Image (cartoon, grey):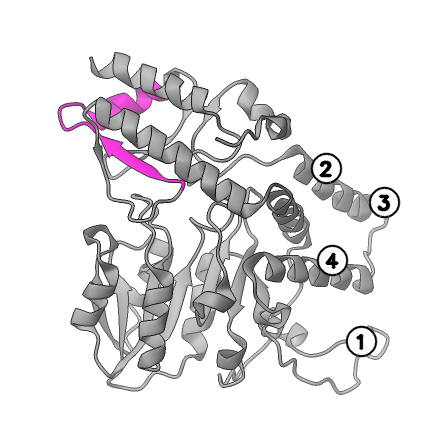
């Protein structure tokens, strides 16, 4: 098993807690805090930060993100969060009266509730927790299905859906595929060019570390050029300088035309630093480590007679419970012992990151063994 202990010094919280809660939010690395403080100093001591410097930050970060996802930088735009990205997509897809949307009813609410009251089209539902997602899609799909909206990694179970197979199916029928990637990006490797997804959206703050309030919307370039976008903000136009305010501006052709106005530069600073950090370690290394660590955790949990939710190919998330024990009691008792995990739908959700160790997993298992004896 790979050893990432060198990087633990970036996370002071690990001195006081065994932090196994990345699916809720990972702690911020020290290097990210320093980068954000450096930009804060500009506000403090310079006041107005020149437009060129802000744009340089945006474009450098866009390039880093595009490389990380294996996408083109013209396909990347900044949003505040997953929800804003999804609502943006819904606003410019032209739905016809008889169209329908397929959505997983157990997606995280960010990728479910926006469709609930979307009265323009019929909704058809599947369940990721029931497994074999593509088979379920085929049962409810018809020629009027315009959009399929799914979570890449399920927020509760850690189930990883077969993205490439689902994308290939959608391409055969000219149906859009929208994926919420927030529980995978930073933990599991992804290649957007290879998978050929239409829309991919995620917020930072979980496996990519804080700050919250900054996210990414990816739109495949072939899709973007065919979308009729009726309304954009002032930064949807090309600006070369601020000296010529009233000069006629051209509408941007890349995804960043959907960045309506002034961006969250502090968030962009943090996101840039976090992706550089993840890339320094290597996302493939992180993925292999997390799959090994969570598989080890599952093996030990089963020895303690815990029920584990199905994860398919796996991820950084494990959800477990004992039928004969109160989950709320176990959860509160674990917190009191210095662990950080989540309680979701009566399941203990455990989500380590690369900074966690096998010994920390063993400590959790020892605690659970004591609490369930």
**Residue sitting at 33 percent across and 20 percent down?**
365
**Residue sitting at 75 percent across and 64 percent down?**
55
Q: Is residue 326 magenta?
A: yes
**Mark linked to residue 240:** 1
**Which of the marked residues, 3 or 1, is nearer the chain's N terminus?**
3
To which residue does mark 2 refer?
34
Label 2 Cα crowd, 10 Å radius (few <14 / some 14-19 / many 20+): few
Q: Disc 4 on helix, strand or loop?
A: helix
Label 1 Cα crowd, 10 Å radius (few <14 / some 14-19 / many 20+): few
Marks 1 and 2 sit apart, C-alpha to C-alpha, by: 30 Å
To which residue does mark 3 refer?
45
**Which of the marked residues, 2 or 3, is nearer the chain's N terminus?**
2
Instruction: State yes or no: discs 1 and 2 in contact (Cβ < 8 Å).
Output: no
| Pair 3/1: label in front | 1
Label 4 Cα crowd, 10 Å radius (few <14 / some 14-19 / many 20+): some
Q: Disc 2 on helix, strand or loop?
A: helix
Marks 3 and 1 sit apart, C-alpha to C-alpha, by: 25 Å
- Asked whether the viewer can see residue 125, the reply is no
Marks 1 and 4 sit apart, C-alpha to C-alpha, by: 15 Å
**Which of the marked residues, 1 or 4, is nearer the chain's N terminus?**
4
- Magenta residue span: 316-334
Marks 4 and 2 sit apart, C-alpha to C-alpha, by: 16 Å
Could you say where residue 117 lies in the image, as x and y percent from the top left?
A: 29, 68
Q: In this view, does 184 lie to the left or right of 308?
A: right
Could you say where residue 123 lies in the image, as x and y percent from the top left?
A: 23, 71
């Amino acid at each position: 098993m790979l050893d990432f202990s060198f990087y633990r010094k970036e996370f002071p919280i690990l001195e006081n807690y065994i932090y196994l809660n990345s699916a809720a939010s990972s702690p911020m690395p020290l290097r990210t805090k320093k980068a954000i403080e450096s930009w804060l100093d500009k506000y403090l001591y310079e006041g107005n930060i020149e437009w060129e410097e802000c744009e340089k930050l945006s474009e450098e970060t866009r390039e880093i993100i595009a490389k990380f996802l294996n996408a083109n930088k013209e396909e990347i735009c900044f949003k505040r969060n997953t929800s804003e990205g999804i609502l943006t997509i819904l606003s410019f897809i032209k739905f016809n009266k008889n169209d329908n949307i397929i959505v997983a009813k157990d997606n995280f609410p960010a990728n479910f509730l926006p469709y609930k009251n979307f009265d323009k089209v019929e909704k058809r539902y599947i369940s990721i927790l029931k497994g074999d997602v593509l088979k379920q899609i085929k049962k409810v799909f018809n020629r009027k299905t315009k959009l399929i909206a799914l979570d890449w990694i399920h927020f509760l179970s850690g189930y990883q859906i077969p993205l490439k197979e689902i994308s290939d199916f959608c391409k055969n029928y000219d149906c859009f595929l929208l994926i919420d990637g927030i529980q995978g990006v930073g933990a599991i490797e992804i290649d957007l060019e290879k998978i050929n997804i239409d829309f991919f959206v995620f917020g930072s703050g979980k496996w990519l570390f804080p700050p919250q309030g900054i996210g990414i919307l990816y739109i495949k370039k072939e899709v973007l050029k065919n979308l009729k976008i009726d309304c954009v903000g002032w930064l949807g136009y090309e600006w070369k300088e601020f000296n010529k305010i009233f000069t006629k501006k051209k509408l941007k052709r890349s995804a960043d035309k959907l960045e309506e106005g002034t961006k969250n530069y502090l968030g962009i600073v943090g996101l840039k630093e976090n992706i550089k950090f993840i890339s320094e370690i290597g996302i493939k290394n992180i993925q292999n480590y997390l799959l090994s660590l969570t598989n080890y955790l599952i093996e030990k949990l089963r020895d303690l007679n815990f029920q584990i939710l199905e994860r398919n190919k796996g991820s950084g998330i494990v959800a477990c419970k004992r039928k004969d024990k109160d989950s709320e009691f176990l959860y509160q008792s674990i917190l009191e012992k210095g662990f950080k995990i989540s309680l979701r739908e009566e399941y203990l959700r455990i989500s380590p990151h690369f900074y966690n160790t096998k010994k920390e997993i063993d400590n959790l298992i020892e605690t659970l063994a004591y609490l369930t004896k």
